Image (cartoon, helix red, strand yellow):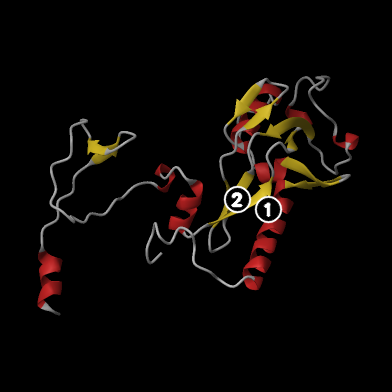
């Protein structure tokens, strides 16, 4: 082991707890950081969700963002009729209206932004936050999961828990007269992403300047 490596191994390191106040890092009590020497190097350890730009966050995490539905898309969120007390509500739509082969009854929801998936290298995928409007409740949700919870609380009044699998409960019209679950749309989107990745040669990312060597 070289002398330089030994020195680095045993040199002292100081951990300073800081927070970001919106413009700069400060100590936890709000006071300024101590004056540091030029070219001082430190590790920034934070939760990935702290990175506001989802594209940069995905790049850092080695994830890919895949758009699966466009802004202003109208989708349907399913509720179980056995959990609904008032099936005569005008806000509830029977599945045979579309038609959709499902036991769920539906509530309209409108996407206020593009709906995207974060796909990891092992193909695990999760939905990105997406503001959506629920006209029948005159409310907005911050994500599809949030929208389902609001809808379930309002209509599935016989349920004790108001969480559910939105990949199975959400339907979108992909072509005229054809509706698919969000899970089917997710699977097809990942398949297209993989096919495109094989066709297109890799090229430097526009983020490489931000994260050299990434």
Relative height, residue 37 to residue 142 (above, below): below
Residue named by callout 2: 117
Label 2 with label 1: CB-CB less than 8 Å: yes
On screen, residue 184 versus residue 128, left or right, reads right
Q: Residue at x 11, y 65 (%)?
A: 10
In x, y percent, where is residue 128? 56, 44
Question: In the rendered image, which quarter is residue 147 located in?
Answer: top right
Q: Residue at image x 37%, y 63%?
A: 212
Q: Position of residue 198 (x, y in %)?
A: 64, 72
Left or right of 57 in this view: 140: right
Q: Is residue 199 above or below residue 92?
A: below
Q: In whole angstroms, how far apart are the C-alphas of marks 2 and 1?
A: 8 Å
Tag on residue 186?
Answer: 1
User: Where does residue 114 sit, x and y in percent of width and height?
Assistant: 64, 42
Q: Earlier in the sequence, mark 2 or mark 1?
A: 2
Rendered-image quadrant of the N terminus: bottom left
* Above or below 198: residue 181: above
The correct choice, above or below, for 30 with respect to 17 in the image is above
Tell whether 100 sits left or right of 202: right
Question: Relative to the observer, which residue lies in front, 113 or 167?
Answer: 113
Q: Secondary structure at mark 2?
A: strand
Q: In this orientation, which residue lies closer to the viewer: 68 or 182? A: 68
10 Å crowding of disc 1: few (<14), some (14-19), many (20+): many
Residue plotted at (65% across, 62% down): 193
Q: Residue furthest bottom?
A: 1
Where residue 133 appears, as percent x and y from the top left, is 66, 28
Q: Judging from the image, what secondary structure is the residue with disc 1 in?
A: helix
């Amino acid at each position: 082991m070289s002398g330089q490596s030994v020195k680095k191994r045993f040199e002292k390191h100081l951990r300073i707890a800081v927070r970001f106040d919106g413009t700069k890092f400060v100590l936890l009590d709000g006071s300024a950081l101590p004056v540091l020497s030029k070219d001082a190097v430190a590790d920034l350890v934070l939760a990935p969700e702290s990175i506001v730009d989802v594209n940069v966050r995905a790049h850092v995490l080695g994830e890919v963002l895949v758009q699966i539905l466009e802004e202003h898309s109208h989708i349907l969120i399913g509720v179980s009729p056995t959990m609904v007390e008032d099936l005569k509500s005008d806000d509830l739509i029977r599945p045979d209206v579309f038609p959709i082969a499902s036991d769920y009854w539906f509530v309209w929801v409108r996407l206020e932004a593009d709906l995207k998936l974060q796909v990891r290298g092992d193909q695990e995928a999760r939905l990105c936050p997406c503001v959506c409007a629920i006209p029948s409740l005159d409310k907005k949700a911050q994500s599809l999961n949030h929208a389902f919870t609001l809808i379930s609380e309002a209509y599935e009044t016989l349920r004790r828990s108001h969480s559910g699998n939105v990949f199975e409960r959400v339907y979108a019209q992909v072509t005229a007269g054809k509706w698919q679950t969000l899970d089917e749309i997710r699977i097809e989107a990942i398949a297209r992403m993989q096919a495109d990745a094989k066709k297109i040669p890799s090229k430097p990312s526009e983020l490489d300047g931000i994260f050299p060597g990434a």
